[in-house]
Image (cartoon, rainbow, N blue to C red):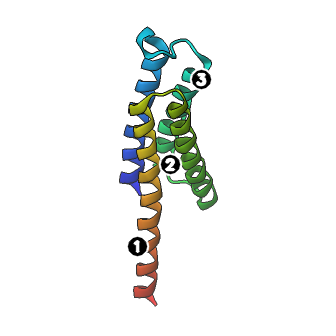
Amino acid sequence: MRNVYLIVAVLAAVGAALGLWAYLTSTSGVDGTSGALIAFLGALAVALGALVALMDLPRWAQITLDVLLVLGAVLTAVAAWFLMQTFFTIVMALAAIVLCAGFVVAGRNSKHHGEAGA
């Protein structure tokens, strides 16, 4: 899962950069709006959360953080979509997809390892 969290951190950092660009640039059409600022902060939170997920956390904290990361990525993608920021939407949706795919693969690997040890 470490690679998954690194990929999500990079995708969310790109999303944060796109969100900051949308907030600061007059050509974005949403410059200076609270929606663009909140979307930027959401992407930044997902990026930082993915870096925290790399730490050795208790199982309950890891599960809680994983759920919050997926929610953050999905909701930030929706916010970017409402702001009509296509690339921002795509990057955050990819972050959510990568997280979910990582959970599926990690679940499959742990089931296979459990069978081998039995």
The residue labelled by disc 1 is: 109
Q: Looking at the image, which residue is at 39% across and 52% down? A: 4
Q: Which of pointers 2 and 3 indicates the residue nearer the eye?
A: 3
Element type where label 3 sits in the image: helix
The residue depicted at 38 percent of the width and 46 percent of the height is: 6
Q: Is mark 2 on a helix, strand or loop?
A: loop
Please, what secondary structure does the residue beneath circle 1 have? helix
Q: How far apart are marks 3 and 1 (CA)?
A: 40 Å
Q: Residues within 10 Å of mark 1 (few under 14, many from 20)?
A: few
Task: Find residue 35 and name its label.
Answer: 3
Q: Which of marks 2 and 1 is in front?
A: 1
Q: Where is residue 92 in the image (x, y as percent from the top left)?
A: 45, 40
In the depicted view, which residue is nearer to us: 2 or 82?
A: 82
**Mark found first going from the N terminus, 2 or 3:** 3
Residue furthest top as drawn: 26
Q: Which residue is drawn at 45% across and 36% down?
A: 89
Amino acid bearing label 2: Ala
Q: How far apart are marks 2 and 3 (CA)?
A: 27 Å
At label 2, counting other C-alpha atoms closer than 10 Å, the crowd grade (few under 14, some 14-19, many 20 or more) is many
- Quadrant containing the N terminus is bottom left
Q: Mark 2 to mark 1: distance in Å?
A: 19 Å
Q: Where is residue 33 in the image (x, y as percent from the top left)?
A: 58, 15
Q: Position of residue 108 (x, y in %)?
A: 43, 73
Circle nearer the N terminus (3, 1): 3
The tag earlier along the polypeptide, 2 or 1, is 2
User: Residue 18 bears which disc, if any?
Assistant: none
Q: Do the residues labelled 2 and 3 touch (CB within 8 Å)?
A: no
Determine crowd level at label 3: few under 14, some 14-19, many 20+ residues with C-alpha closer than 10 A: some
Task: Kindly identify which residue carries mark 2.
Answer: 53
The residue at the point 46 percent across, 53 percent down is: 99
